Amino acid sequence: MTNDPHPASLHTPLCDLLGCNLPVLLAGMGGVSRWELAAAVADAGGFGMLGMVREDPALIIQEVTALRSVSGRSFAVNLIPAATEPALLEAQIACCLELDVRFFTFFWDVMPDIVSRVKDAGCTVLHQVGTVEAARQAERAGADVIIAQGIEAGGHVHGRTPVFELTDAVLSQTSLPVVASGGIVDGTGLAAALAMGASGVQCGTAFLATEESYAHPYHKERVCAAHGDDTVLTDVYVLNWHKGAAVRVIANSQTGALGGRYLGHDPDTLPREPIARDEGQPRLRFSTDSPLRTTTGDLEAMALFAGQGVGDISEIVPAARRIADMSAQADRLLRGPVLTDQDVPI
């Protein structure tokens, strides 16, 4: 730990742009990144995000209101235009603008009209991408920050390039702040990202396994017990999305039954079989829904999202502690010997 919760060695211009003290972003994990977790990350010095993909505007109002009632820190709302019906997406954006949300995070396909819609309202746009070409598209569309997502990431994974390789390639193509995302769970990853010129990191798995996350305790426990090689990249959990949209999950009975054929599944051929429920709504066996606090049913068979850095997460802690430990470790590394390739997590 460190006496200074916000070491100067970690401050980057991204912090000034986003209004945070540390260049550590909470991933906009749908269902998991609710107000309690976003507030905890923001109040600890990081940048919070609300994962609101395909959520009803009423929930967005509820979450934004709750977040603002406990924290005055800045935050973003994460939406995924390509996975959202156009009328609902428009209602979501209109709702956010009415609430005076100032930061948006988008993911998957770059949709210039959507970026322009919120930029014209004076908002700041962070866009997560999985390829250099998508990064170029996001910059042309007007994004202010590029989040380079590597193949190590948990949840939906758009590209197939390791995080630091992609981050380096994107850095060579843009003058925008670039955030590294994918398998980064501790100060080693944060220090490595900053040392190579990135402006910060985005973390999902590290914050899923915290007291404030909205993930089901079972999901958190599986994260703490897993190793990096326990995760698989598969498109069998594809219902609610489109064909070929791969996710990284902790291996379970469903992935074990695939016989090693993790990719190439057609959602039209998958059964629509309810195996769980969440506040009265059915959750299908091969849907992208992960188990939340409110979920009941066959949790083991659901999508247990986790990145390849999962092996370095062994306990469920408050989000503030995870950030403090991460920043203290990164500060020590950046003030010590120069990082080598062996210090970069893979």
Image (tube, rainbow, N blue to C red):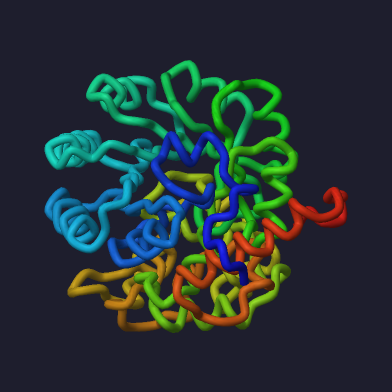
| Residue 131 horizontal/vertical position (percent) | 62, 32
- Residue at 34% in and 38% down: 104
199 left or right of 259 in image: left
Above or below for 213 versus 110: below
Q: Is residue 346 visible?
A: no
Q: Where on the picture, by quarter, is residue 290?
A: bottom left
- Residue at 45% in and 83% down: 218
14 left or right of 29 in image: right
Q: How many marks?
A: 0
| Residue 258 horizontal/vertical position (percent) | 62, 67
User: Given the current orientation, which residue lies at the most extreme front position?
Assistant: 3
Above or below for 76 versus 168: below
| Residue 143 horizontal/vertical position (percent) | 44, 26
Q: Quadrant of the C terminus?
A: bottom right
- Residue at 30% in and 42% down: 84
243 or 130: nearer the eye? 130
| Residue 181 horizontal/vertical position (percent) | 59, 48
Q: Where on the picture, by quarter, is residue 189?
A: bottom right
Q: Quadrant of the N terminus?
A: bottom right
Q: Is residue 297 visible?
A: yes
Above or below for 44 versus 216: above
71 or 141: nearer the eye? 71
- Residue at 25% in and 73% down: 278
Above or below for 1 versus 135: below
Q: Where on the picture, by quarter, is residue 95?
A: top left
